[in-house]
Image: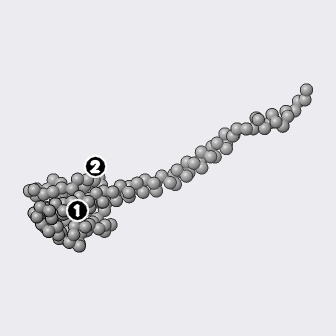
Amino acid sequence: MSATTPASDRAAIRAGFSLLEMLFVLALVALAIAIVMPRGAAMVDQATAHSVFFDFQRQVSDLRLRAYHTETPVVLAEPGTQVVGAAVVRLPKRWSYRLDRPLVISEGGACPRAEAVLLRDGRQAMRLAAADGRCRFSRLS
């Protein structure tokens, strides 16, 4: 018998990966995740903010339609304010809004100039303004 191992046996022994190769691949994957994760989290936050903005906009539009169809003014106020009979926009948890003053939507569906701030956990996430008389808010920042 020969003391050397045939070439086919050496190939079978070398079929796996070494520990160094595995660690190198894991380091590359960890680096890729470290680069992508902050951007991914920021994109999710931005998408959530846009969703809340569009929900706020839809609810204000519904109030405008209600004022138009019932031919009675609708007052939009912040939650917790002492405005009798005021409507309130419902937002997801951790989100709220602040108005520069209660927004009075006339029986014809018109709105005065108004500004609103969408807050997430009490911090400003987005500043909005309605200037066209149709209660359509646009994003300022």
| Residue at x-position 22% and y-position 62% | 61
Which is nearer the eye, 65 or 3? 65
SS of the residue at dot 2? loop
Of labels 2 and 1, earlier in sequence is 1
Q: Residue furthest right?
A: 1
User: The residue tagged with tag 1: helix, strand or loop?
Assistant: helix
Q: Is residue 104 visible?
A: no
| Residue drawn at the location 25% of the way across and 67% of the way down | 136
Residue linked to disc 2: 93
Depth check: give the residue in front, 84 or 132: 132
Q: Residues within 10 Å of mark 2 (few under 14, many from 20)?
A: few
Give left or right: position of 15 versus 141.
right
CA–CA distance in space, label 2 to label 1: 21 Å
Q: Position of residue 98 (x, y in %)?
A: 22, 60
Q: Residue 5, percent across and down?
A: 85, 33
Indicate the quadrant where residue 87 lies.
Answer: bottom left
Residue 127 appears in which quarter of the rendering? bottom left
Nearer the observer: mark 2 or 1; the answer is 1
Q: What amino acid is found at the position of numbered circle 1 in the picture?
A: Ser
Q: How many marks?
A: 2
Q: Residues within 10 Å of mark 1 (few under 14, many from 20)?
A: some
For the residue pair 63 and 26, the one nearer the viewer reads as 63
Q: List x then y, in percent, for residue 62.
A: 21, 59
